[in-house]
Image (cartoon, rainbow, N blue to C red):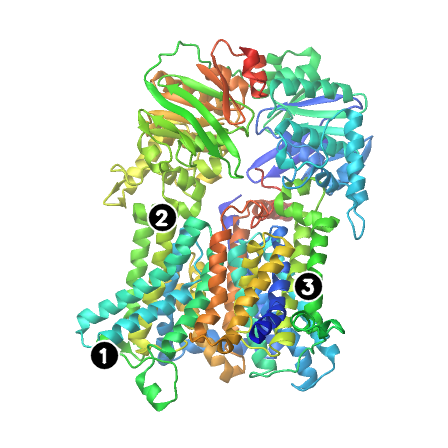
Amino acid sequence: MTKNFTVLYKTVIILLAILATLLLSSVILLILGADVFRTFYTIVITPLTRVGHITEVFVRAVPLCITALGVAVAYRSGIVNIGAEGQMAMGILGFTTVALALPDLPKPLLLPMALLASVLAGGLWGFIPGILKARLQVSELLSTVMLNYIAAQFYSFCLRVPLLDPAEALSGAGTPQSARLTANIEIGRITGRLHYGVFVALALALIVYLFLWKTSFGYKMRASGAERRAARYGGINVPAWVTLAMVVSGAFAGLAGGIEIAAVHRRAIEGVTNNYGFSAVVVALFGMLHPFGIIPASFFFALLIYGSTLTPRAVGVPANIVDVMQGLIIIVIVTTQMILQNTYLEDRVWHWYSAKRKLKQEV
Amino acid sequence: MDIIVNILSMTIPFSVALLLASIGEMFNQRSGVFNLGCEGIMAMGAFVGMLVPFMVGHGGAVGQGWNWLGLLLAALTGALLGLFFAVIVVTFRAPQGIAGIGMQMFGVGTAGTLFRHFVGGTQSIPGMQNTPVPLLCDIPVIGTIFFSHNLVVYLAFIFVPVAWYILFKTSWGLRVRAVGTHPRAADTMGINVNRTRYEALALGGALAGLAGAYLSVCQVKMFSDDLIAGRGFIAVALVYFGHWHPVKIMLGALLFSFAQTIQYNVQGLGINIPYEFFVMLPYVVVIIVLAFTSRNQTTSPAALGKPFNREIRT
Amino acid sequence: MEHISKRFPGVLASDDISLSVGEGQILALVGENGAGKTTLMNILMGIYQQDEGKIFINDKEVHFRGPEDAFNAGLGMVHQQYMLVPNMTVTENVALGYKQAWKPLKLDLDMVRSRVVEISSYYGLAVNPDAYIWQLSVGEQQRVELVKTLCLGAKFLILDEPTSALTPQETDELIALLKKMKNELSVIFISHKLNEVKALSDTVVILRHGAVVFSGNTDDYSPSQIAAMMTGHEIVLPENREEAVRGELALSIKDISVRSDRGFLALDHLSLDVYQGEIVGLAGVSGNGQRELAEAINGLRSIESGSIEFFGTDIANKSPYYVIDHGMGYIPEERNIEGIVPSFAIRENFILKDSDKKSFSRYRFLKNKAISRNAEVLRENFDIRCPDTATAAGSLSGGNIQKVILAREITRAPRFLIAVYPTRGLDMGAIEFIHQELLKKRKEGIGILLISEELDEIMNLSDRIAVIYKGSIQKVLKHGEANRKNLGILMAGVGREEEE
């Protein structure tokens, strides 16, 4: 097999994968009777045409990136965290509770404390499925989903009762949300709603990279994920590393929630998590589970998520279309990976290709 | 007493969606495929199922036949999605867990998108009527609990022994069990492993689609984005709980729907706990049950989650 | 079969092979591991499709799209790893291929059952049709395989290494049976054990690297001539001839009991001592507790009672890390998933047990230069054939993977070594290399526990031979006392009282 062929083969497969995603999404759009081209244009291009749009894309990219980094740490350690949604919700509760309880602390003390609370709350919510998986072999796919539902209920209970804004209670409207938090927890904004959390996300990406590939901790985590039996036989305490990976993963999601409150909403309201937990799984996979892939991937998916909020008015396509596309993208990514790994198929195509070429030369 | 009868009489119809979906998932897993996309297939089934009576009657009353047509189309949709999943995980051998998550997002997303376009906001339909069993329904207590539901409920419970028979007494069931335990052996016996898995996934998908439609047509009688609310995932957990056996799965489904029905009777029970905690209850139960049953799964299909490739030499 | 070729990525598994078998004949297909014997037979059975070439039966060309077509043509194969579904009964396993019993709404198991009974009594192959496969011993499972194949109407039997898991006595029985069946059946017998080939076959075909290097009448050639043609060059495996210099007691196992994954007692009050400077071979039919023993010693499986002392330290129920830290070297059974992390680079696999050691990391930050340098040295010393040390270890051949593991374990300077089936499935060159390394270590005064099912390997290398049966040691024999016969008797569990 020549090197040129390998490159060509891989490029063609990836192009086919993109084409398959577009075609499958188009099928749904055609059922809706929507203008396929305009819909894609609205989702992918329109948000890039104005600065105001671009900052909104970045606002969504920050929680996606941080959460996806956490998902990648877990995934590399052999545990699929689809519970980031719940971990993020718990992080928000932790952050809000500290902010409401200690409103008079000075900012340099309060903000780190509140963020730490979000990290701990998220980490705790990640610890549960981690330890269940490590000690009792409970499928994390199921336990994290269940914990998402539990967290969602707990979240709405907290907003409805203990954290409820006293003003809402007085007015009787009862919108479930917390009071506006003190200015001492705010993370500053650069322009529009774009905030300094962007730099936190970038710094975390670098840290995750160094941790996973340059330290023996990361080595052990990756070994546990790549082949847990070999890792165990090699004296690595696999359950401990898997649990830790899940705690880290939850902590990242919790932190993403905390930053989201500190920088964007500044009070806990319904719908902050906005499906970021699930999207983060897509982002992590799309970024090939590597921090430097996750950074652009989170921007791309933030683009899709923001773009899809424009579609109902622009082309009459419900915003849920982004879920359809994300689902399809996951499916296509994992399928494409398997096809690229299939040396048997590649070998067969190579023989077919070289036979074709020989025929051509003879003619 | 009344409240207990009330809870129990709700437990049975509420268990049907879980029962159908988890029996379907049982067939999937017995063939060696872990379909976490069940949730998504249920959502699509729920949407398609309610769409038929809604389009015909515009939310008003329609003949019962249209409800049945909705259920049928939902099962068909489910089967097609099951086959789509088979293409991904059987033919292309994608990792099943994460592909299932993709399938779930795709199914729930598509159902939500189409629902907004074709139906719009929350619209209820009259749905399936109850058909009490003559004579038996007049027995006090027992009649109310067991014999005053809609036809799908009875059929679903009759399906439990049928599923057992299919799995253990037919050649198809034998093939399904073989490809889920030792696909290579099945292959050397001339059994088409991938084809058998396609068939099992189609059946499992059809049952999941039907389960979803049961929710929208027979139980809640409307569709919403969070209608399925994790039942697809609970169905997967039930299969573990029931050790891949239809009768034990049925018992599990009843247990979980019991936990679910409590939330509708909280006030009647006079318990002063915020209702969110009752909504949480089934999910908590799932985690606890998984914690106790996930270890020592010696009965699990040995090839569960493992794609089959004839040419990879081991 | 004529001019059969089959490609796998990177290898030509079958290269223009032609062979033929007459009615009532037994053909031995001989070759090293990896020579392409099994691939060829899988093509014959329709499991793989050939890229080129044709197959004829009774002079008619046939195209098998799958095994079913092969069954219908009267072919049947007993695979090396038995193709039986463990949680099904014998009858159900036969029913998988017995299409006549597949009624539309019912599976006619009674019909299958009577067929099983009929065939087993006709050929004198005793099987219980209602037993579950997992309840049966290896020898019984093989009988089930034969019965299954015959039930499906095989007139032409292919046996892939049928004796590899049997005791010598069971092997003799099988050979006698096949000779008897020769009147009605044709047989292709795959083996690399030349005494069996001589005893059984009429003609012999030798494969090397996927191509036929020889075919002829068995009687015309001696085993050593066949062996030479099989490997292509003379290989005389090293033997342990020097007197053992017994050092201190290294590993002392007393009365341990361990449960298997299925929950039954896999080791039943097993005791064994191994000293420095000796190789103790553990012989036995696989599945008698070997895996559990190795895992228990290495802290991978908890023990219920008894003690394991390693140079005086109690290592029972300690973590694998603790055991490794006390100087244990371990070559595990499943090299692809237990010995290496397949997706990791070769150089990363070398530090699997030492990522925290000073030589490879500082303040937990990995020293990439040291890791690469180490890998280059090991690659050189152990002759690991790979493009470079950044290659994923899982993409190497079995022999090279085993060299990676051996290199890692030996250079860690262990005080003791446990090797579990270290040469399973390897070619002669690799086997020779591994045997030499093990003997070298012994000479350096290290104790080795060698677990193997190859009696020749055990008898060649060991100073003492312990025989394991159903989780306990039957007897420990000295190097000179052991022969195939008495080992075979012990492996079959025939009481030690009678022996003594």
Within-10-Å neighbours for mark 3: few <14, some 14–19, many 20+: some
Mark 3 falls within which chain? B
Amino acid type of the residue that numbered disc 1 sits on in the rendered structure? Ala
> Vertically, is A122 above or below A106?
above
Residue for badge 3: B157
Residue C439: which quarter of the image?
Answer: top left
Amino acid type of the residue that numbered disc 2 sits on in the rendered structure? Ala
- Judged by depth in the image, the label closer to the viewer, 1 or 3, is 3
Q: Quadrant of the N terminus of chain C?
A: top right
Residue found 55% across the figure and 52% down from its top? A339
Q: CA distance from mark 2 to mark 3?
A: 44 Å
Amino acid type of the residue that numbered disc 3 sits on in the rendered structure? Phe
Mark 1 falls within which chain? A
Residue found 34% across the figure and 57% down from its top? A248
In the image as oriented, which residue stretches furthest toward the bottom? A171
Residue for badge 2: A240
Secondary element type, mark 2? helix
> Vertically, is B312 above or below C257?
below
| C207 relative position to C456: left or right | right
Within-10-Å neighbours for mark 2: few <14, some 14–19, many 20+: some
Residue for badge 1: A183
- Judged by depth in the image, the label closer to the viewer, 2 or 3, is 3
Residue A33: which quarter of the image?
Answer: bottom right
Secondary element type, mark 1? helix
Q: Position of residue C358 (x, y in %)?
A: 24, 38
Q: CA distance from mark 2 to mark 1?
A: 39 Å
> Can you see residue A49?
yes
